[in-house]
Amino acid sequence: MWFGKKIVSTTHQLSKMSIIMVAIAVLALLTSTNCVEGQKGKKIGSFEYMAISCRSHSASLTDFGGVGDGTTSNTKSFQAAMNSLSRFSSSGGSLLFVPPGKWLTGSFTLISHFTLYLHKDAVLLASQNENEWPVIKQLPSYGKGKYGETGRFRSLIFGTNLNDVIITGDKGTINGQGDIWWKKSRTLKYTRPSLIELIYSTNIQISRLNLLNSPSWHIHPVYSSNIIIQDLRIIAPINSPNTDGIDPDSCSNMRIEDCYIVSGDDCVSLKSGWDQYGLAFGMPTKQVIIRRLTCLSPQQAVITLGSEMSGGIQDIRVEDIVTTNTKSGVRIKTAIGRGGFVKDIYFRRMNMKNMRHVVLMTGDYNTHPDQGYNRKAFPLVRNINYRDIVAESVRMTAQLDGISGHPFDGLCFSNVTVSLSAIAEKSQWNCSDVSGVSSGVVPKACGLLKDQQKTNCYFPNDVLPIEKVVLKKCFVK
């Protein structure tokens, strides 16, 4: 775990410190004196690591012509390695070792029963040549992109229909070099790429890495299940567009834990498709555990559900979160036309400082892929629970706006203590078209959340299947 970092307590200081922190982190990681360029023929050596599966075969990127000088493209070397190592899929699987160096590459695709392992002094540098980023179709649960794009650039590390995939290392680095993409985001013909995207896949582990400066979302698992994401350091400038940390999308049985995230957008955003496309696809995000995160995002939220939630979001368990200088603690976004549901959501033990809102809910987030959405598709928002929350220096405790005639119901707040900033709003709770209960809440909750003394909002105590997965100690000799 990479926690315990002291973070400054004002937004002005944060902006300076975050930019300096990111710059120092990137500079240190990319110019380490321990990096060795072009280690062709260097043997892997021996090491151990923790993983959901161990491998019987291993190879180094240099075995496939890789050159770690920061300027030579290794896209063909990565793909040649995948093509060669795929023959071991049915005989114990394989591991590709990325040694010390700066390994420039465009988008490449992974294989099943495979581990990509980055040495601590290995840096994958994303190519800034658009020709090294193939264009693929938009996801079926989304229709067109945010700005009407008909296609999207494939992610740097990509895979589809895979089983048993591990992306890990000894705190090696994947740098998306997203600045060039951010500057031209509104003029691109296709949607900006993510850093890591796995689709229709199962048994996934992403761990022990530095992820920097993605062109868009850093990690985007889609239509996938049985996923462990842990011990990551995800950093992007606080003014970078759409650089979400982790975005589970129509995924199930997932564990996100022990991560440190600095982002220009949401730290974690749960999704499941957009309007009529998400409704037709009908695959929810469910059974997700999010715990022990440290997050910082002055522009957006720690945890967001939606706004693309038409396939449904259910049974999300969030606990032990630390955040500072983040716009919102928890945000739920939806609108008429989404349909779907957000229900059975649980939060506990969140410690927050310097926030605009602790909780934000809106039923009028009216962005749509096109005009074909159903004006009578009303989303269901129900059984949302918040307990054991402490927040300091807050401008407004909660803004809760449901949908007229279709209120958000079953909201519960218990043991929530909020201290206000010097520029706090006069009204601390603004509620409309919601219903629920509250207990032990300071400042006192709005009248639509009936005061029920000694109520303790529910948090599930059953164990999800993904919690039972224990990583194995693996060896490379």
Image: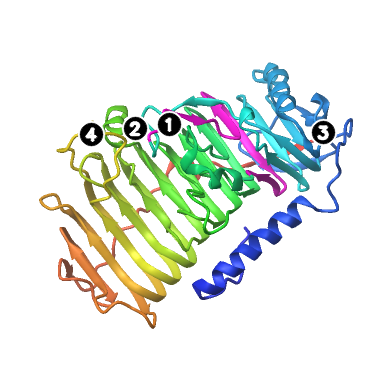
Real-space CA distance between mark 3 and mark 4, rounded to the nearest whole angstrom: 49 Å
The structure residue drawn at horizontal position 56% and vertical position 43%, both measured from the top left corner, is: 181
The residue identified by callout 2 is 283
Disc 2 residue type? Met
Real-space CA distance between mark 3 and mark 2, rounded to the nearest whole angstrom: 42 Å
Labels 2 and 1 touching (C-beta < 8 A): yes
Which of the two labelled residues, at mark 3 and mark 4, occupies the earlier sequence position? Answer: 3
The structure residue drawn at horizontal position 39% and vertical position 80%, both measured from the top left corner, is: 421
Q: Position of residue 182 (x, y in %)?
A: 54, 47
Real-space CA distance between mark 2 and mark 1, rounded to the nearest whole angstrom: 7 Å
The residue identified by callout 1 is 223
Which of the two labelled residues, at mark 3 and mark 2, occupies the earlier sequence position? Answer: 3
What is the number of the mark on residue 67?
A: 3
Disc 1 residue type? Tyr
Labels 2 and 4 touching (C-beta < 8 A): no
Which of the two labelled residues, at mark 2 and mark 1, occupies the earlier sequence position? Answer: 1
Q: Secondary structure at mark 3?
A: loop
Left of 209 or right of it: where is 418?
left
Q: Secondary structure at mark 4?
A: loop
Q: Is residue 109 visible?
A: no
Left of 222 or right of it: where is 395?
left
Against 427, residue 211 (above or below) is: above
Q: Which residues are magenta?
A: 148-176
The structure residue drawn at horizontal position 72% and vertical position 30%, both measured from the top left corner, is: 95
The residue identified by callout 4 is 373
Real-space CA distance between mark 3 and mark 1, rounded to the nearest whole angstrom: 34 Å
The structure residue drawn at horizontal position 45% and vertical position 60%, both measured from the top left corner, is: 299
Depth order, front residue of 280/93: 280
Depth order, front residue of 115/332: 332
Real-space CA distance between mark 4 and mark 1, rounded to the nearest whole angstrom: 22 Å
- Residue extending farthest to the front is 187
